[in-house]
């Protein structure tokens, strides 16, 4: 598998503390877009602190792998993965 979950976790860990744009597919043509800071990584998920609301949102590495969630660095406009 080209992008295993452990490789995805390493890519996320390399950008901790950076500002990101997160796009999440919520189904039925609903796309949720949020801006925040990559805050922490855990064995199965990572958290993003949302700038506007001040709360945390968590996503799994599997969601990145299946493209349900996209994470893009704000500084370079480069997608992680």
Image (tube, rainbow, N blue to C red):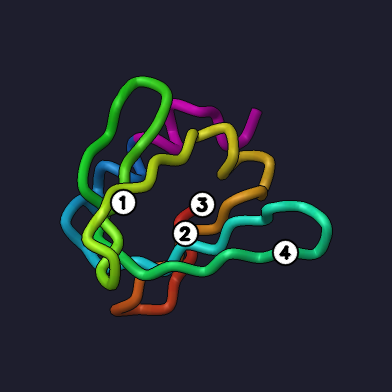
Q: Are marks 1 and 2 in contact (CB under 8 Å)?
A: yes
- SS at badge 4: loop
Give how far apart the Cα atoms at labels 1 and 2 are.
10 Å
Mark nearer the N terminus (4 vs 1): 4
- In the picture of the structure, the residue carrying the numbered disc 4 is 30
Rendering quarter of residue 47: top left
- SS at badge 2: strand
- In the picture of the structure, the residue carrying the numbered disc 2 is 71
Q: Which residues are magenta?
A: 1-9
Q: Residues within 10 Å of mark 4 (few under 14, many from 20)?
A: few
Which residue is located at x 44 percent, y 71 percent? 78
Q: Are marks 2 and 3 in contact (CB under 8 Å)?
A: yes
Give how far apart the Cα atoms at labels 2 and 3 are.
8 Å
Front in this rendered view, residue 71 or 3: 71
Give how far apart the Cα atoms at labels 3 and 1 are.
16 Å
Q: Are marks 3 and 4 in contact (CB under 8 Å)?
A: no
Exactly how many numbered labels are in the figure?
4
Image quarter where the N terminus lies is: top right
Mark nearer the N terminus (3 vs 1): 1
Point out the frontmost of discs 2 and 3: 2
């Amino acid at each position: 598998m080209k992008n295993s979950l452990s490789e995805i976790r390493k890519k996320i860990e390399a950008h901790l503390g950076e500002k990101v744009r997160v796009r999440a597919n919520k189904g039925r043509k609903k796309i949720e877009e949020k801006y925040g800071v990559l805050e922490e990584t855990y064995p199965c998920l990572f958290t993003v602190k949302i700038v506007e609301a001040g709360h945390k949102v968590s996503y799994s590495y599997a969601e990145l792998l299946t493209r349900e969630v996209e994470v893009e660095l704000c500084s370079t406009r480069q997608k992680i993965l």
